[in-house]
Image: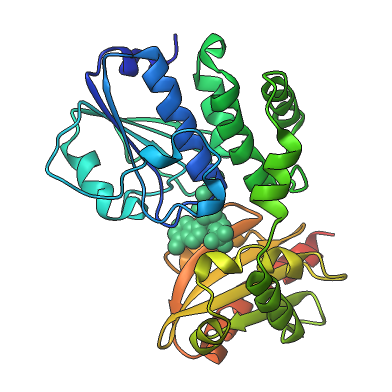
Amino acid sequence: MTKLDQMLDTAASIVILGHVNPDGDCAGSCLAMYRYAKKRREAADVSVRLKNVPEKFSYLDGYDRIQDTVGDEVFDLCICLDCSDRERLGEFEVYLERAGASICVDHHVTNRGYAGENVVVPGASSTAEVLYGQLDKALIDRETAACLYTGIIHDTGVFRYSCTSAKTMEIAGKLMETGIDFTRIIDESFFRKTYLQSQILGRALMECIRFSEGQCIFTVVKSQDMEFYGVGPKDLDGIVDQLRTIDGVECAIFMYEMDTHVYKVSMRSNRVVDVSRIAAYFGGGGHVRAAGCTMSGSIHDVVNNLSGHIEKQLLAGSEND
Ligand code: AMP
Ligand code: MN
Ligand code: MN
């Protein structure tokens, strides 16, 4: 029996948490955990707390049971999923502090193990993949499988990113055997864009700028652009990935203005640059090929600061060739 199952079996009340601005892996893993915990422990009080889960994930079983409020409850067990550090739990961090026991299941290299028990597998494609390994397969039904599959396709860009392994594919195959509607999950939650999302993507691509002999590229969406198109941060998903696939690009930077002179930065790399190191240097985190952080200053300052680190790695990389 896994540590997670042992902890589930001895808790009367359980809270499931993820990271701020939940993505597909976070939402999928949390809802898979929710359904599994309810199935395994019918008598237990199980709760999922997440804020601003995008509506495109409303097909996931349990979506309408997600609560976004913080109260004074104390849970026996707090399960943290896809969250690299405790601050990224946002306002729900208090539940971790109060809980009798806690376990974190994650795949971020920058995770230092902030919970009581930590199951962190940096090489795994997604938290959903790590979580699958912790669950009793007999209790994974079609609904739970759809949640886990969603987590995997979102963090692998539908099996395209280098984090995808043979094991990822095997797990995806097992999940497909439960009868999930995988084409619909992929199209509706990953590829579908609204008209306005497509417009802002086009605008961001039109304005992208290359540097370091075309090996790096960046684009920025200012708050006035977001207001003009009537879009929010979640509508900007996928822009950085479009930049990454441009011919000759090793490292892509996408940033949007969160506040005056405050930018949320997303970085992606293809082969050489370890973007998690750069993000961690600026107080963020993530993975070798996909990481993020928040930075202050003018656009020029932010790009300059990042490019110094990127170029250093590019230079070291070319010396190794
Ligand atoms: P993003 O660029 O926001 O899609 O994030 C890429 C990866 O980096 C994800 O796995 C995030 O969990 C992680 N990440 C993004 N921003 C931060 C941050 N401020 N702190 C820690 N990890 C982050
Ligand atoms: Mn995530
Ligand atoms: Mn993830």
Please identify the quarter of the rendering in which residue 117 is found.
top left
Residue drawn 36% across the image and 47% down it: 50
Q: Give the quadrant of residue 229.
A: bottom right
Give the side of residue 69 with respect to residue 267, left or right: left
User: Which residue is drawn at the image coordinates 39% and 13% (left, top)?
Assistant: 40
Residue 288 vs 179, above or below: the answer is: below
For residue 208, side relative to residue 287 (left or right): right
Considering only vertical position in the picture, is 171 above or below 288? above
Image point (42%, 65%), residue name: 283
Q: Position of residue 66 (x, y in %)?
A: 36, 42
Place of residue 12 in the rendered image (x, y in percent of width and height, measured from the top left): 22, 18
Q: Position of residue 244 (x, y in %)?
A: 75, 66
174 lies left or right of 46: right
- Residue extending farthest to the right is 247
Residue at x 49% of width, y 30% of height:
32
From the viewer's side, name the closer residue of 232 and 129: 232
Front-lying residue, 197 or 102: 197
Count the numbered circles shown: 0
Would you place residue 57 above or below residue 134 in this image?
Answer: below
- Residue 306 in picture, x, y percent from top left: 58, 77
Q: Nearer the viewer, residue 286 or 311?
A: 286
The quarter of the picture where the C terminus appears is bottom right
